[in-house]
């Protein structure tokens, strides 16, 4: 069965790509395209060929459903189709509707002419998966459009609209309208080519030129190296585009193929591809069928007009869902609304939002002092102070007013959702929605499923996550859920490293150099050291066996809460968030070392990274083993989308896989013989997988 339809329109052959939803270039579609080209080539009555997709998609490139299967490389390959197009003696027109991405655009580039619908999107986004176009894209695009534009397009992976494509020369003609009219425009264009006696026009026969090529590529390498720290693909793309300028086409193709193979087998590309597929797995919940009915979410209410509450309200307004902010004090509401307005105004000033869109979103956010406002909401989210007694009181008030069927959500980051649910008359309607700060920016949403959470409530919340443009990841109930439970072990080791001789800046520096967006001490200064202090106080009562360095408490006892007080692990100049090492902190740490009888030692960056990363992976293994997380890739996505983990490392579980679980286990056992060694207990799952030579993912 073919996924391409072949038809005749007078003297024109039409090959219609038909592999919804995005016309991925799977084996059946490739076979259909090849069969159509061969049939058109043999038919003497056919004078030209039109290749067209749907109004929504010309082709999105490789079919992800075939990744890692024999079909992905089965004959005919995309390379063989492109070779056939190069050999065609009749002009072939690509008619692009919707988008042409990756291999889809490479297919269009191999056609001899291109016509596109208005606002069609054209891109070679392979760099976002840690690879580069592997079917001639790096060689054809610089021969067709200015080299600087081609390099920018390939190295960024960002799409250009068809209108800009026409200006650059990527598109030959723009159709007047999308949909069925695109085919009519393509047929008319092909007829005109025949009438004008124009035959095939092969990009491979064109020449790529740029003035002062040596200086151009030297500058391009320097700029790319600076912008792509940790990502090897952009620099390899510069090499390939340079080959397009300096070498004949066939030699350039060999360079592209060699660099593609190098990248596709590299850890960075494997990590980015892991991230790509992991994100698509997060919505799959074994006991929740995809057709589970969901509750309509047309109105929302958020209790608490602070930073989190305001950010959550913005999430709803951004998605077109009205949100009511509720707080006990008018000044808190005024301050919250003003912060929201400033956030939107900042986005407008940067050109990322139109003023009329800001005004529309602001009208969707209302404020109220009275809890009675929750009665019309389909979901009510409490975002009050992170204390059990405060949240229990708020949830009981919501329960007494909210309409039947409304979802009662808690934005807790650590507290027991089951205990919170038990305080209301409808525990089946209670769910955790742990947004990450700033909520209007961060992509992660931990959806915490309580023991009594109804299946339709979970399905509705997961769908809502997509509506809010979040990566929603299911977590079971435990202290800290997935992300913060793991973070606690990470920070525990970071503090022990301080005890032993490291400094906040040496630990942060080592982890940032390794790839994290920021180290733990910069992070806590930004979030507020008093938040962690509150958790440690609770820990001392609930889990007195949990060992912490007391140095962080000493810091908080001096009122050093971070950026908001101008002093934390670092000091901060007024109006500047840049952390400045503070001798007072080093004196505080030295005094604590003396108090506990530790002589400081030099600690290498490698040890800092290993102890912090393996602490994350080991606790992640416990979380998977206990069923708190559904799968290792979900744990990775929590860290990739919520904690500044470098995408090219693939997440803590994937990183442990790349190191080798036997090596991770051996390191943990070695750490168990050192300072505070009793805090290192290898996860049973880690030990089992390491013994079997297996991986988390």
Image (tube, rainbow, N blue to C red):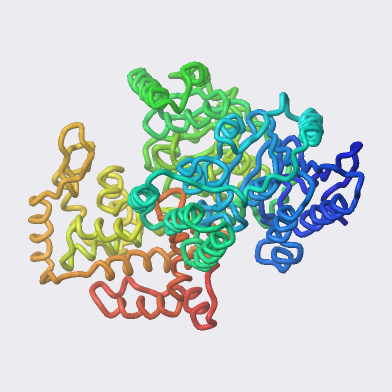
Q: Measuring 72% from the left and 24% from the top, which residue is drawn there?
A: 176
Q: Measuring 73% from the left and 45% from the top, which residue is drawn there?
A: 200
Q: Is residue 358 above or below residue 308?
A: above
Front residue of 349/246: it is 246
Front residue of 518/125: it is 125
Q: Measuring from the top left, give residue 624's x and y in whole percent.
A: 52, 64
Front residue of 618/333: it is 618
Q: Is residue 611 above or below residue 200?
A: below
- Left or right, 98 with respect to 486, comes to right
Front residue of 249/427: it is 249
- Left or right, 8 with respect to 533, comes to right
In the picture, which quadrant includes the N terminus? bottom right
Residue lying furthest bottom: 691
Residue 633 can be seen in this image:
no
* Tally of numbered discs: 0
Q: Measuring 59% from the left and 61% from the top, which residue is drawn there?
A: 250
Q: Measuring 54% from the left and 25% from the top, which residue is drawn there?
A: 374
Q: Measuring from the top left, give residue 296's x and y in whole percent.
A: 67, 32
In the picture, which quadrant includes the C terminus? bottom right
Q: Is residue 671 above or below residue 349?
A: below
Q: Measuring from the top left, give residue 537's x and y in whole percent.
A: 28, 52
- Left or right, 49 with respect to 307, comes to right
Q: Measuring from the top left, give residue 476's x and y in whole percent.
A: 54, 55
Q: Is residue 131 above or below residue 343?
A: below
Residue 573 can be seen in this image:
yes
Residue lying furthest front: 197
Picture quadrant of residue 342: top left
Picture quadrant of residue 100: top right
- Left or right, 453 with respect to 438, comes to right
């Amino acid at each position: 069965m073919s996924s391409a339809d072949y038809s005749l329109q007078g003297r024109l052959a039409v090959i219609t790509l038909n592999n919804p939803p995005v016309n991925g270039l799977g084996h059946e579609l490739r076979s259909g395209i090849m069969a159509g080209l061969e049939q058109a080539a043999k038919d003497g009555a056919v004078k030209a060929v039109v290749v067209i997709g749907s109004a929504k998609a010309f082709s999105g490139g490789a079919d992800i459903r075939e990744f890692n299967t024999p079909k992905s490389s089965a004959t005919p390959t995309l390379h063989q189709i492109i070779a056939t197009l190069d050999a065609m003696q009749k002009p072939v027109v690509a008619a692009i509707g919707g988008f042409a991405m990756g291999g889809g655009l490479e297919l269009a580039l191999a056609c001899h002419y291109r016509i596109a619908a208005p606002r069609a999107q054209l891109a070679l986004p392979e760099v976002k998966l840690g690879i580069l176009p592997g079917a001639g894209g790096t060689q054809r695009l610089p021969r067709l459009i200015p080299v600087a534009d081609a390099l920018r397009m390939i190295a960024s992976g960002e799409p250009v609209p068809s209108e800009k494509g026409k200006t650059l020369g990527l598109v030959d003609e723009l159709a007047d309208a999308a949909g069925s009219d695109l085919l009519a425009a393509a047929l008319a264009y092909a007829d005109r080519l025949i009438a004008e006696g124009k035959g095939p026009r092969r990009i491979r026969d064109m020449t790529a030129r740029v003035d002062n090529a040596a200086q151009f590529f030297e500058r391009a390498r320097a700029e790319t190296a600076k912008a792509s720290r940790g990502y090897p693909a952009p620099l390899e793309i510069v090499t390939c585009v340079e080959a397009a300028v300096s070498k004949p086409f066939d030699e350039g193709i060999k360079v592209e193929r060699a660099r593609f193979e190098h990248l596709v087998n590299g850890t960075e590309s494997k990590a980015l591809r892991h991230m790509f597929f992991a994100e698509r797995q997060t919505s799959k919940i074994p006991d929740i069928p995809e057709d589970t009915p969901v509750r309509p979410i047309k109105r929302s209410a958020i209790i608490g007009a602070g930073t989190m509450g305001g950010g959550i309200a913005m999430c709803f307004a951004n998605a077109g869902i009205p949100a009511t902010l509720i707080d006990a004090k008018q000044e808190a509401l005024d301050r919250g609304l003003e912060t929201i307005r400033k956030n939107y105004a900042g986005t407008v000033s940067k050109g990322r939002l139109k003023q009329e869109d800001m005004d529309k979103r602001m009208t969707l956010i209302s404020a109220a002092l009275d809890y009675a406002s929750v009665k019309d909401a389909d979901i009510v989210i409490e975002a009050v102070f992170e204390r059990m007694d405060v949240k229990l009181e708020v949830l009981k008030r919501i329960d007494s007013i909210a309409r039947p069927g409304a979802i009662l959500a808690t934005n807790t980051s650590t507290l027991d959702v089951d205990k919170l649910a038990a305080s209301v008359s409808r525990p089946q309607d209670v769910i955790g929605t742990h947004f990450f700060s700033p909520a209007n920016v961060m992509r992660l949403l931990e959806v915490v499923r309580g023991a009594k959470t109804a299946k339709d409530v979970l399905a509705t919340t997961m769908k809502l996550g997509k509506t809010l443009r979040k990566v929603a990841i299911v977590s079971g109930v435990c202290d800290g859920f997935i992300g913060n439970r793991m973070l606690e072990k990470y920070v525990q080791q970071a503090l022990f490293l301080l005890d032993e001789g490291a400094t906040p800046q040496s630990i942060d520096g080592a982890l940032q150099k390794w790839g994290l967006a920021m180290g733990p001490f910069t992070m806590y200064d930004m979030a507020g050291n008093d938040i962690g202090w509150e958790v440690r106080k609770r820990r001392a009562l609930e889990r007195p066996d949990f060992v912490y360095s007391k140095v962080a408490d000493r810091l908080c006892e001096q009122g050093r809460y971070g950026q908001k007080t101008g002093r934390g692990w670092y000091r901060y100049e007024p109006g500047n968030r840049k952390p400045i090492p503070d001798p007072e902190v080093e004196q505080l740490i030295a005094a604590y070392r003396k108090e506990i009888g530790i002589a400081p030692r030099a600690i290498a960056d490698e040890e800092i990274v290993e102890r912090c990363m393996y602490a994350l992976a080991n606790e992640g293994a416990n979380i998977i083993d206990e069923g708190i997380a559904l799968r290792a890739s979900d744990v990775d996505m929590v860290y990739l989308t919520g904690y500044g983990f470098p995408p090219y490392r693939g997440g803590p579980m994937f990183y442990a896989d790349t190191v080798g679980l036997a090596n991770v286990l051996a390191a943990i056992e070695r750490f168990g013989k050192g300072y505070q060694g009793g805090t290192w207990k290898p996860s049973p799952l880690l030990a089992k997988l390491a013994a079997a030579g297996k991986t988390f993912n």
